[in-house]
Image: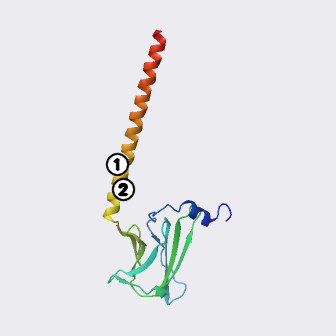
Amino acid sequence: MRLGSPGLFLLLFSSLRAANFSVPVVSTPHSPSQDELTFTCTSINGYPRPNVYWINKTDNSLLDQALQNDTVFLNTRGLYDVVSVLRIARTPSVNIGCCIENVLLRQNLTVGSQTGHIGERDKITENPVGTLEKTEVTWSVLAVLCLLVAVAVAIGWVCRDRWLRRSYA
């Protein structure tokens, strides 16, 4: 395995359990033909490999996966980037959403797009347990930092006493 290859980064970060994807960006629909519209959804820097869904926002149904073409790849940081292209028949009013699902984090990032209202951010749902875990990690880090400060103060106090004793002798 050569240095700088994505596999090496994945090996180095094998302890990486999950990383949030960026909020998806849905491009303005364009028409390669008179009969269809093309939407592009992009999200980067997540882990593990995402699931991508396109949603009919009118009735909240999933669109047929045969209509989409997903490209998912490891970037230089060993995280996943995804680009999904959706091609649908042209209709007078289109209201769709792109959903990036991170199964490990139980997180769905959904961005809606409407003809005339492109790229609205609809919702981000997160696992409440994930928020609790983040709080626990924050308190653990603060506890370790307080312990380090206490040890540094104790060492400084001992060194100060020894220095004062030498200066009086």
Residue depicted at 44% across the width and 26% down the height: 156
Amino acid at circle 2 = Lys
The residue under the point 33% across, 66% down is: 127
The percent position of residue 153, horizontal first and vertical second, equals 40, 30
Q: Residue at x 38, y 39 (%)?
A: 147
Task: Give the position of the N terminus as an image quadrant.
Answer: bottom right
Q: Which residue is mark 1?
A: 139
- Describe residue 51's horizontal placement relative to residue 135 as left or right: right
Residue underneath mark 2: 134
Tell me where residue 64 appears, x and y as whole percent: 43, 87
Residue 163 or residue 115, whichever sits in front: 163
Sooner in the amino-acid sequence: mark 1 or mark 2: 2
Q: Secondary structure at mark 1?
A: helix
Point out residue 26 in the picture as x, y percentages from the top left corner. Answer: 46, 73
Q: Residues within 10 Å of mark 2 (few under 14, many from 20)?
A: few
Q: Position of residue 96 (x, y in %)?
A: 40, 79
Identify the residue at horizontal 57%, vertical 63% (top origin).
11
Give the residue type that dot 1 points to: Trp
Q: Which mark is residue 27?
A: none
Q: How far is mark 1 from mark 2, CA to CA?
A: 9 Å
Is disc 1 surrounded by few (<14), some (14 to 19) or many (20+) residues within 10 Å?
A: few
Numbered-mark total: 2
Q: Quadrant of residue 13?
A: bottom right
SS at circle 2:
helix
